[in-house]
Image (spheres, grey):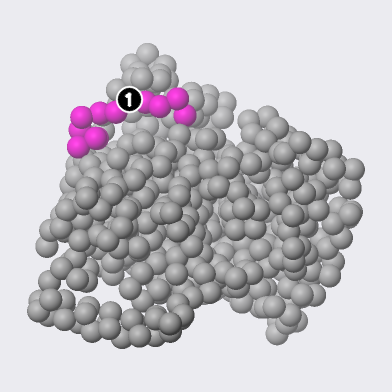
Amino acid sequence: MFDKQSLKRIATPLIALLLVACASGSMPGVSQQGAPRGEAMVAAANPHAVEAAQEILRAGGSAVDAAIAAELVLGLVEPQSSGIGGGGFMLHYNAADEAISGYDGREIAPAGARPDMFLDARGRPMPFLDAQASGRSIGTPLLISMLKLAHEDHGRLPWARLFQPAIRLAEEGFAISPRLAGFIAYSGGAGGRLRADFAARAYFFDRQGNPLQVGDILRNLDYAATLRAIAEQGPSALSQGPIADGIVATARRNPRGGSLALSDLSAAQARRFEPVCGPYRVYRVCSTNAPASGNALIAILGLYERARPRPEGVNSADDWAAFLWASRLSFADRDYYMADDSLVPVPTLDLINPDYLNARALLIDVAHAPEQTPPGAPPGHPDLYDRWGRDLGEDTGTTHIAIVDGWGNAVSLTATVESLFGSQRMTNGFLLNNQLTDFSFTPTLNGRPVANAVAPGKRPRSSMTPVIVTDRDGDLELVVGSPGGSSIIAYTARTTIGILDWGLPVQDAINVGNATARTETVAAEITRFPAGIADALTARGWQLQQTSLGEVSGLHAIRVTPRGLEGGADPRREGVVGRVSPEQSAMPSR
């Protein structure tokens, strides 16, 4: 009898030979041109986006193809969260060789950006709403560049085919959902400046200036025209020509105009990256590299594993206390060190070094909450420990998509325009991001430079942590991620623990109360906690605060089980899960 690993050693070279043969055309129907072998699944934040992904999967598209179609629709029906005027991070799992690859579409500060551009005339940080609803906050949009890069590597259907569902929906119109209607009303009032932009006012409000209501039909012919241009020209449609001119003019418009120029749009490019991976019990967890925060999530899991080698489950106060402790320690390091590692030194791997995590885990006392959690001193970087000032920040206009296709490939995609409706400036049917407010507004703290300070050509720090988990043999186990500002890290880590350690079904793990221990006050969904957990944590000294609107997660996850794919969508938003059987899928067009 062969064990699983022995079979893999035999099968891997055979698969490689089959792929070569199929590429030459001698063995059709076996490799990427073959029919899907299993069911496919998508979990995303809006039913229209899930339907678009299902359409592409049924047409023989890959996980990347389906993710692109879903995200283009999300930019239409959920514009407060993501879109082609923003950016994102994507992880891809290739079932043929078990490789996990990363794609970075993080926006970049223009050449004219200045460290003090979010300070007022007296050197104080601008009010956040002023900074958000301004041209200064707009970075170069790189979502489309990232999606095109991933499609070149892993697409099956033609690029232009992926745009058809979103174009059709934009032209035919869609009914405004309760979530979108609520945010239009909020951002058109004291909670935002959406009315101040002419294009946004004309799109989201009626002729009397009233916000559009639930069920109103919204059409976006400008968005459809932009998508047609991108379908034909690729990312260059956003870096040269009339759409690019509109982006620059909108960003530079007063009041508080920015410095974004056509040269910035032409120079900025998405990039591939090596995911940050770490062991977690019998699994391997992979997520984003700097300037994003995948190592912070991996650190939470590593610290939790050390504190709870034998976890008891969701009803254990010790397990919850260990998770909060792990979060506090990881966030302390992340807030201090993380930034764009192409411009500042970042000890990304040192912060998840096993010896370093062993030392940090010794601080955990599940019986008592910590009084203070300063950053640690990772090995190999003693010069960085006293170098930076620590800053907080980041907001919540983000979405997440999880997809597994019929070949067993997977995508975990987190995309964003940063705050609600991004910069609240609109051009050519889409909103522009306010991603540069993810930089520290203050370039120095207590006489020290801040690692995440503004600089020309720099990517702001990000909390986005799309995750792919495999077993020890490299087989796909879990695809998970969430929006939610800096709380993304905690949302995704807690859900991963709930599924892998606490044995919860995927949907139940998503439904459990969130808790983000970034500071002394823990933002918590106390009403979603198991009975007695909140009281037990409070008795141990944890300061739990139930937020008035609840937490803003949008968790979506898919797990591979012996019984098939198991998915879950966050009930806190409007997401759903969709399946596609092998019988529903067609051969891909070439």
Q: Residue at x 53, y 74 (%)?
A: 472
Query: Is residue 178 located in the magenta-colored stretch of the structure?
Result: yes
What element does badge 1 sit on?
Answer: strand
Q: Residue at x 80, y 38 (%)?
A: 532
Q: Which residue is labeled 1 in the image?
A: 175
Q: Residue at x 45, y 34 (%)?
A: 574
Query: Is residue 382 located in the magenta-colored stretch of the structure?
Result: no
Does the image show residue 577? yes
Nearer to the camera, 290 or 508: 508
Using a 10 Å C-alpha cutoff, classify the residue at mark 1 as few (fewer than 14 neighbours), some (14 to 19) or many (20 or more): some
Spot the residue most to the top: 208
Q: Quadrant of the C terminus?
A: bottom left
Spot the residue most to the left: 26
Nearer to the camera, 155 or 103: 155
Q: Position of residue 266 (x, y in %)?
A: 30, 64
Q: Position of residue 523 (x, y in %)?
A: 71, 42
Left or right, 348 with respect to 322, comes to: left
Q: Position of residue 331 (x, y in %)?
A: 70, 59
Spot the residue most to the front: 1
What residue span does the magenta drawing correspond to? 168-179
Q: Residue at x 49, y 68 (%)?
A: 470
- Above/below status of 392 relative to 538: below
Q: Position of residue 17 (x, y in %)?
A: 23, 84
Does the image show residue 106? no
Residue type at mark 1 is Ala
